[in-house]
Amino acid sequence: MERSDETYNPWSIVNLVFRHLADEGLHPVLGEAGDPGAPATQLLRALGITPAVEGNRRVTDGVTDELARLREAFEAGHAGQSYPEGRDFT
């Protein structure tokens, strides 16, 4: 089996499994109460998937790129301005 650098949001996998189970007439529940993160992690590991904290790498990279672009635009638009209490927001 060839491995790929492609990543998936773990919740997308959990959602896919739950939809399949529901289509089969089952009523899956992820954890009885509280944070469903631990049961979701167990489900993914049972499927041979190692959940990654960063989720979908492409989405994370896109968010990082967008924040950098906004930061640059903000800095360009506010160059040379002074801020209250001597704060420098760069």
Image (cartoon, grey):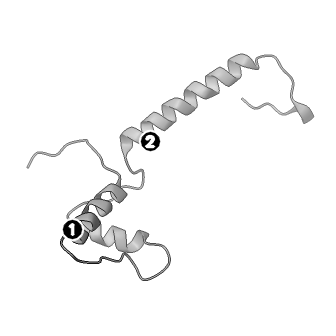
Is residue 67 among the parts visible in the rendering?
yes
The answer to whether 36 is drawn above or below residue 60 in the figure is below
- Residue nearest the viewer, comparing 24 with 54: 24
Per the image, the residue denoted by label 2 is 60
Per the model, the C-alpha gap separating discs 2 and 1 is 31 Å
- From the viewer's perspective, tell me whether residue 75 is left or right of residue 2: right
The answer to whether 68 is drawn above or below residue 26 in the figure is above
Per the image, the residue denoted by label 1 is 23
The answer to whether 48 is drawn above or below residue 39 in the figure is above
- From the viewer's perspective, tell me whether residue 64 is left or right of residue 52: right
- Residue nearest the viewer, comparing 81 with 27: 27
Q: Earlier in the sequence, mark 2 or mark 1?
A: 1
Q: How many marks?
A: 2
Residue sitting at the far bottom: 32
At mark 2, the secondary structure is helix
Identify the residue at horizontal 50%, vertical 77% (top origin). 34
- Asked if the residues shown at circle 2 and circle 1 are in contact, with their CB atoms under 8 angstroms apart, the answer is no
Identify the residue at horizontal 28%, vertical 70% (top origin). 43
- The image quarter containing residue 71 is top right
- From the viewer's perspective, tell me whether residue 33 is left or right of residue 85: left
> In which quadrant will I find the C terminus?
top right
The answer to whether 64 is drawn above or below residue 82 in the figure is below
Instruction: Identify residue type, mark 2.
Output: Thr
| Residue 70 on image: x %, y % | 61, 27
| Residue 86 on image: x %, y % | 89, 32
| Residue 39 on image: x %, y % | 36, 74
Is residue 50 among the parts visible in the rendering?
no
Q: Residues within 10 Å of mark 2 (few under 14, many from 20)?
A: few
At mark 1, the secondary structure is helix
Instruction: Identify residue type, mark 1.
Output: Asp
Identify the residue at horizontal 81%, vertical 16% (top origin). 80
- From the viewer's perspective, tell me whether residue 87 is left or right of residue 90: right
